[in-house]
Amino acid sequence: MLDGLSGPVSPEQMDHLKIVLKSVNQLHAMIRDLLEATRADSGKLRVEPRCIDIGELMRQAVAMMKPTAAEKRVSIDVSVDPAIPLVFADPDRTLEVFINLIDNAIKFTPAAGTIQVKASLVETDPSSVYLSVNDTGRGIPQGSVPQIFERLYQDPDAIDGNRSGLGLGLFIAKEIVVLQGGRIWVASETGSGSTFSFTLPLYSLTKLLFPIITYQGRLRTEMVLLRVELTPRNQSLRGSWRETCQQSLEILRRCIFVDKDLVLPPTGNSGLAQTFFVLASTDMARVTALMDRIREQVGNLPQLKASGTMRVMAESIPPAPAMDARTLEQQVWGVADYVTEVIQQGLWTKPNEKEMTINAS
């Protein structure tokens, strides 16, 4: 009705419809939070970690919240340390945490205020990425800080006519972070703003790669990185499509030689398109057999043929120098760094790349 699909709407009717829509959205958010809190209490809150680019996810969260911030004339900036490698976390759940923290920051930051969303590395904790949302708002009374993440807690002094909710957002955010092996905390003073911080585990390929890409105390001379992309034809197939992707992954794991190849943990941020990476101990001439096997076994999955397409690409990994002075572990680190860079930057347009597209129909 707001879009005028049912005919012209007067200005007064438009105002009333906007109030109705706002109320419906608030009720939807409350019901969603209640369901999430119930899952957390019963141990049924699930996370599905994968290798993600945390900077991309942060920019997505900020882009989603900028219209809300613009209404209050609040600016949001993003700062990401370029040295941060891939993070091992659930992209949808982590996006939920960012949205919650940014939304709270907007609510409690006055006009002309600023919000800073930041990701950084800390020398004393090399296994984690440190993420924070800082605002220039009213801050949190010291007496409320210890309770801020408790279920259903709301500080009476922090609630005004522009804010509504059940006090579950921060409780859910804490549960999501803890389930992913991180921790969350807040630093705040009344009148000086707040900084909500949390950690997530970094993803390291080295331990996974070592037994696969080494043989008889040496680095294998030939290695290929395969990329398998699954794309749905219909964006409304969210539930069934995820099940299709999971079944495809299980079949993909049966296509490889377990002592020479490795299916990496799923990669990618929020969205329906799914990407799987396979590191194969072979060369570009012989990798075609593996690509054919993937085409036959994964591409012929009935659910995939009915609802999406698959694209398979392969890229050779540069071999180590003939006279390499590095230790074997350092050589494996080098391969892991190269693979991580390829995944992050999407370098799939090189001359030595093979591509195979399978249009399931």
Image (tube, rainbow, N blue to C red):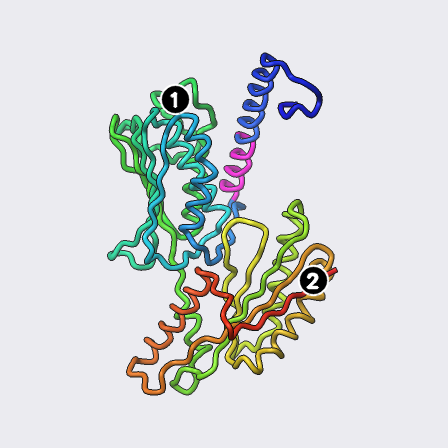
Could you say which disc has been placed on residue 215 in the image? none
| Labels 1 and 2: the sequence-earlier one | 1
Instruction: State the separation of the CA atoms marked 1 and 2.
Output: 53 Å
**Which quadrant, please, contains the N terminus?**
top right
- Is residue 303 located in the magenta-colored stretch of the structure? no
The three-letter amino acid code for the residue at tag 2 is Asn
In the displayed structure, would residue 331 be above or below residue 271?
below
Residue visible at 65% across and 74% down in the picture: 293
Q: Label 1's element?
A: loop
Q: Residue at x 36, y 27 (%)?
A: 108
Q: Nearer the viewer, residue 88 or 325?
A: 325
Q: Where is mark 2, residue-wise?
A: 359
Prevailing SS of the magenta stretch: helix
Which span is picked out in magenta? 30-42
Quarter of the image containing the C terminus?
bottom right
Looking at the rendering, which quadrant does residue 215 occupy?
bottom left
The foreground one among 291 and 346 is 346
In the picture of the structure, the residue carrying the numbered disc 1 is 159
Q: Are marks 1 and 2 in contact (CB under 8 Å)?
A: no
When the figure is inspected, residue 165 is found, relative to residue 331, above or below; the finding is above
Quadrant position of residue 205: bottom left
In the image, residue 19 sits, relative to residue 150, either above or below, namely above
The amino acid sitting under disc 1 is Ile
Image coordinates for residue 218, horizontal then vertical, percent = 39, 85
Visible in this render: residue 274? yes
Dot 1 crowding, Cα within 10 Å, few <14, some 14–19, many 20+: few
Residue 62 place in picture, x, y as percent: 43, 40
> Which class describes the residues within 10 Å of circle 2: few (<14), some (14-19), or many (20+)?
few
* Image location of residue 157, percent across then percent down: 34, 21
